[in-house]
Image (tube, rainbow, N blue to C red):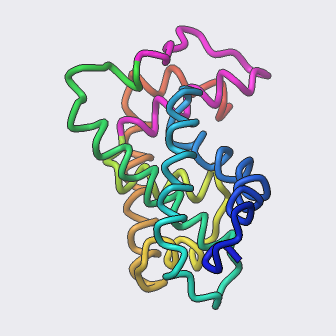
Amino acid sequence: MVLAGEPDAFSRLVERHGEAVARQMRNFSPNPAVIDELTHDVFVEAYLNLANYRKDAPFRHWMARIATITGYRHWKSRDRRKNQFAFDEGQYRPLEKPTPGNPEAAGELLFELFAELPDSDRLIMTLMYIDKIGQKEIARRLNCSKTAAAVRIHRAKQRLKKLGREERWRRRVQWMIS
């Protein structure tokens, strides 16, 4: 319909998939302005590549893959400017004392912990533990074999465990794993 030139067809796609894309973009930044910008970027990318959609998978899967690539691209460009900002565009406030029963504190602590991982590992952990995506879907989104995805998942988990064993993190996450 969009490719056929129907003027309102793309706006219907945005309405239908906008919230899901925005939800996924929250995994790449806690900053609402950045989330909006990334969501917009996903739809621009989708619009520009609609002719490449092959219809062999649901449209939402195709959009999720574009969202993953867009979010990863955001991390890469942000890391190039890392000296400018401590974490994410100035909107992040580190928690001094997260407390049990506070899911927001746990989420912010998780963002902090994931931020110290290399981007490729952070992407894997975000897909697995925040988006709750399985190995097969991770392989599809990263355009690699299931075996390669399994290896990348294993390595990312090992790096996360190593980071969690560091004293500065162990004290902060103890309340979550007790």
Residue 105, quarter of the rendered image:
top right
Q: Is residue 95 rendered magenta in the image?
A: yes
Residue with the most extreme top position: 96
Which stretch appears magenta? 90-116
**Residue 93, horizontal then vertical, whole percent:** 50, 13
Q: Is residue 130 above or below residue 93?
A: below
The residue located at (49%, 82%) in the rendering is 52
Q: Is residue 142 found left or right of 22 in the rendered image?
A: left
Q: Position of residue 141 (x, y in %)?
A: 50, 72
x and y percentages locating residue 41 in the rendered image: 48, 49
**Residue 101 forms part of the magenta stretch:** yes
Q: Position of residue 168 (x, y in %)?
A: 39, 21
- Quarter of the picture containing the N terminus is bottom right
The residue at the point 53 percent across, 57 percent down is 67
Q: Is residue 40 above or below residue 172?
A: below
> Which residue corresponds to the image point at 44% horizontal and 84% vertical from the top-left?
147
Q: Nearer the viewer, residue 103 or 52?
A: 52
Instruction: Count up the numbered dots.
Output: 0
Quadrant into which the C terminus falls = top right
Would residue 173 be found to the left or right of residue 10 on screen?
A: left
Q: Nearer the viewer, residue 144 or 102?
A: 144
Is 16 placed above or below 4 here?
Answer: above
Q: Residue visible at 73% across and 57% down?
A: 17
Residue 36 vs 118, above or below: the answer is above
Q: For this rendering, which residue is in front, 17 or 100?
A: 17
